[in-house]
Image: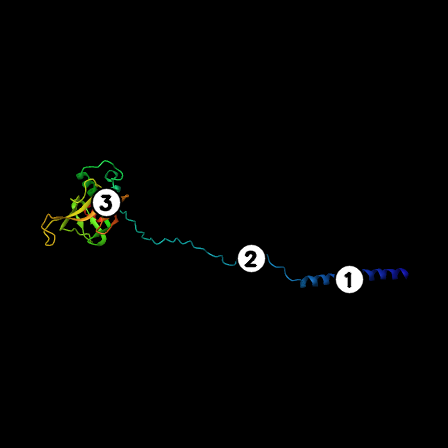
Amino acid sequence: MALGLVRMIRRFSVTFVGLCILAMSAVVLACSSDTEPTEQSPDSDSTSSEPEPTFVRVTVTPFPIDTPTPTAVAKTESKFTAEQLADPVFPDWLDPELNDEQPEDDVVFEGWQEYLSNTVMTGIDAYGIFGDFTVCDEGIILVTDGEVNENILWGITRTVAMSSSQWGTVALVFELTQGHPQVGPAGTKYTFATLHRKDGMIMQSTVSAMHEITITRSMKCLEPSAE
């Protein structure tokens, strides 16, 4: 009887252990079913279904811009030398303060006339009026607007009242090309101004005093001769 009791107890133990194993298996399965599904990787099929962007290369032709071609401007060469265009310089050989040897009268007159040709004498006293006076080559005189004065010519000489020893003093004279009722017939000459070379300056004598005049180059004289 005791042996039968022992066998009964063993059977009950095996049965109880089997029931416990089954219960634990059911709990494990229940937990695994409640777990959230894992997130899919970026390489999954869900992303591969999206359309890829398409780029189209377009060739753009720039609009032509008309750029004007610069026209070369021909340089006009001057017909005069730099010396001719520059203001005249009084020659030393014609200056009595720099040269002890007195030239002949004709040489003095020609020297002064060459020095004054194609110049503007500024500050000269013409009949009591100070102003500009333009004298060109060949005795030509220009009036204010640049036109040639057809009535008179200019020149350099010495009057009877001037001493020949004072060769630094000359007379600027006018000669009538046609008769004038108040001056005289054609060919009449009269003194317009008395000029001096003094202390390196060109001076003009008037009735009451002596004053300086300036001598500059006249382009109005040069332009007609270049045509």
Identify residue for label 2.
Answer: 45
For the residues bearing labels 2 and 3, Cβ distance under 8 angstroms:
no
> Which residue has dot 3 on it?
196
Between label 1 and label 2, give the one nearer the viewer. 2
- For residue 199, the mark is none
**Alpha carbon separation for disc pair 1 and 3:** 152 Å
Task: Sort mark 3 into few (<14), some (14-19) or many (20+) by Cα contacts within 10 Å.
Answer: many
Q: Count all numbered tags in the image, as a single digit.
A: 3
Query: Residues under labels 1 and 2: Cα distance?
Result: 44 Å
Residue count near mark 2 (Cα–Cα under 10 Å), binned few <14, some 14–19, many ≥20? few
Sequence order check: which comes first, mark 1 or mark 3? Answer: 1
First-in-chain label (2 vs 3): 2
Between disc 1 and disc 3, the foreground one is 3
For residue 106, side relative to residue 68 (left or right): left
Q: Is 66 left or right of 187, judged from the image as shown?
A: right
**Disc 1 residue type?**
Cys
Rendered image quadrant of residue 110: top left
Which corner quadrant holds the N terminus? bottom right
Quarter of image, res 102: top left
Q: Position of residue 203 (x, y in %)?
A: 25, 47
Q: Residue at x 80, y 62 (%)?
A: 16
- Which circle, 2 or 3, is nearer the viewer? 3
- Coloration of the structure image: rainbow
Is any part of residue 217 visible from this angle? no
In x, y percent, where is residue 125?
22, 52
* Residue under label 1: 20
Which residue ends up furthest to the right in the rendered image? 2
Amino acid under disc 2: Asp
- Of marks 1 and 2, which one's residue comes earlier in the chain? 1
- Horizontal and vertical percent position of residue 83: 26, 41
Q: Residue at x 87, y 60 (%)?
A: 6
